[in-house]
Amino acid sequence: MIPLIDKFLWKGSEHVYSVPWLRNRIEYSSDPQRVRAYLKGKKFTRSQLSMDMLTRFHLSNNSIVVSHDEHAHFLRALFLERMPAPECYPDMAKKLVDQVFKAKEPVDTTECMPLSGEMIREVYISLLSNLLGVNVLTPLHDYINTIEFKPGTRPMHLDGIMYAFGLQLPGFGPMRTLVNWVFFKGDHYTRKIAQTLEQMVFDFSTAKPNSWYATLLDLKTSKRITSEQFRGEITSTLVSAFALSSALTSMLLCLAARPEYIRSIQLNEGFAKHFVNEVLRLYPPFRQFGYEEKGIWSEKSKTSNQEATDFMVTVYGLHRNEDIWEDADQFKPERFLNPGSAGGCKFLPFGMSKRSCVGRLYSMRLLVEVLKYVCSEKTALTLSLPKDFEADYMGLPEGASGRLVSFPIDDRICFSWPHAEARSTPSMDEPTVNTMSNTMSNTQEVQRCPYSSDQNRLAKHKDNVQQLRANRESAVNHKRTTNIKRPT
Ligand code: HEM
């Protein structure tokens, strides 16, 4: 049973699986040719099965992730307009790294710590501040600092089994809570944290002008989204902290395992992106995503028992498929030097097509900037793995298999940071005061990073000014030339 589950979940067996009483027939694939064929031939969307599982067994109630295509399309466009402008990422990365590795006093010796827990707290703050676009007030900041990191431990195939028995149906809510509470305390705790955080964002933050949060508030007030959808989007941003933290953690552990790449990144900053790609290839935070063909229930399902109704891409299997990746288990960022190497549906850490990850650009930019900052000679942060680090046979970190979002099993990292000046500096948009009595000063923003839409507006304004100048100059020239031509 376990090898079979392992086979179809992780390697992608290319067969169609079904349970007699379930209407879904699922194909698991890790073959890029098959994925390409699916992508080309069919009108598809995120599968209802994936959405049910995300809603009931995970945390994505009422957000873009579980919306129908039209609603998702409408919100995605607004979300992308509210992304931080490209020039903000180096500073965001610096703050994040400084905060994660902050220490009160300069140290000469090497310190070791479990990275994921530190990372997730700082990613929460960073996402709230930069992506949701809120001023994080002191109580919320303090609460985040108390969060203990417990990644979900419930295996994905258990979700599948629960689904097969109909436990995703709303009436089974209390039973699901009980199962989590008894057997999967980490998942139960994570759910509680998400609910508390969502409420606290509402109570203890203020919207930055033109931010995604301000837009969501407008949409709610004008009744274009419901209160549940408004809350869902906040939770969705917070939940995405897991994927981003997983990627950041894996990346820094890989850097500690392969310090020889530091020089390549210093010499050629473009190489940082190849390094990040290689991390996402070997450690895709999301191990699986799924689609269904539109209309399959009404037509094909009645006539064909062979055809799959749901198509699941097993990202981990795809990224380690030995038929398409040379030395698939080895860490070789230079494989991405070849321009076509990420194409052809063989590298899909952020999913594909119109429902692919909307946080992709943000995540990639931040990952690359964090890597560049850590590797920079000026930063002087040295990372290494503990002597007794639990590595795989390549000496690389080992990801926990079977989870929807996977973190390394052993995430301890050792670091030394001898230069006091490289340490954390108070950030502009994070609270610098400790009492509620003067929270007003938190809400008054001194400086903020522009959003893409601001940039567009600025660019448009500049274009307009240039256009006006050009028009005026050409009018003057025209007058001059016509004046010259005019017979005297
Ligand atoms: C390294 C970090 C991340 C990874 C690897 C990742 C990966 C993914 C994947 C695989 C999907 C499913 C795509 C599909 O079904 O085709 C997804 C969807 C999504 N992600 Fe991410 N994600 C990351 C970070 C983020 C961040 C920071 C956000 C910010 C809010 C975010 C927001 C979303 C949303 C809203 C969707 C649903 C899009 C839709 O349904 O149209 N993700 N992500």
Image (cartoon, grey):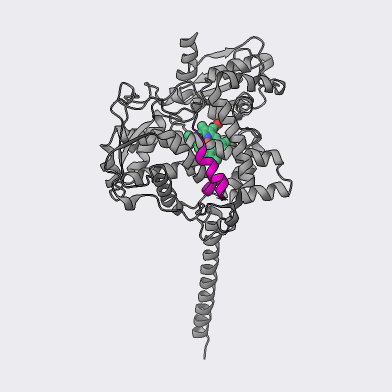
Q: Is residue 278 magenta?
A: no
Q: Is residue 358 above or below residue 44?
A: below
Q: Is residue 394 above or below residue 129?
A: above
| Residue 172, image x, y percentages | 69, 20
Corner quadrant of residue 297: top right
| Residue 481, image x, y percentages | 49, 81
Q: Is residue 254 left or right of residue 463?
A: left
| Residue 83, image x, y percentages | 53, 49
Q: Nearer the viewer, residue 175 or 75?
A: 175
Corner quadrant of residue 55: top right
Q: Residue at x 59, y 30 (%)?
A: 191
Is residue 254 visible from the viewing direction of this image?
yes
Q: Residue at x 51, y 68 (%)?
A: 466
| Residue 317, image x, y percentages | 44, 22
Q: Is residue 142 magenta?
A: yes
Q: How many marks?
A: 0
Q: Nearer the viewer, residue 273 or 232?
A: 232
Q: Main secondary structure of the magenta part?
A: helix
Q: Is residue 284 left or right of residue 158?
A: left
Q: Is residue 363 above or below residue 162?
A: below
Q: Residue at x 48, y 44 (%)?
A: 362
For the record, the magenta segment spans 128-149
Q: Is residue 105 left or right of residue 11?
A: left
Q: Nearer the viewer, residue 459 or 153?
A: 153
Spot the residue most to the bottom.
488
Q: Nearer the viewer, residue 103 or 320?
A: 103
Is residue 209 visible from the viewing direction of this image?
no
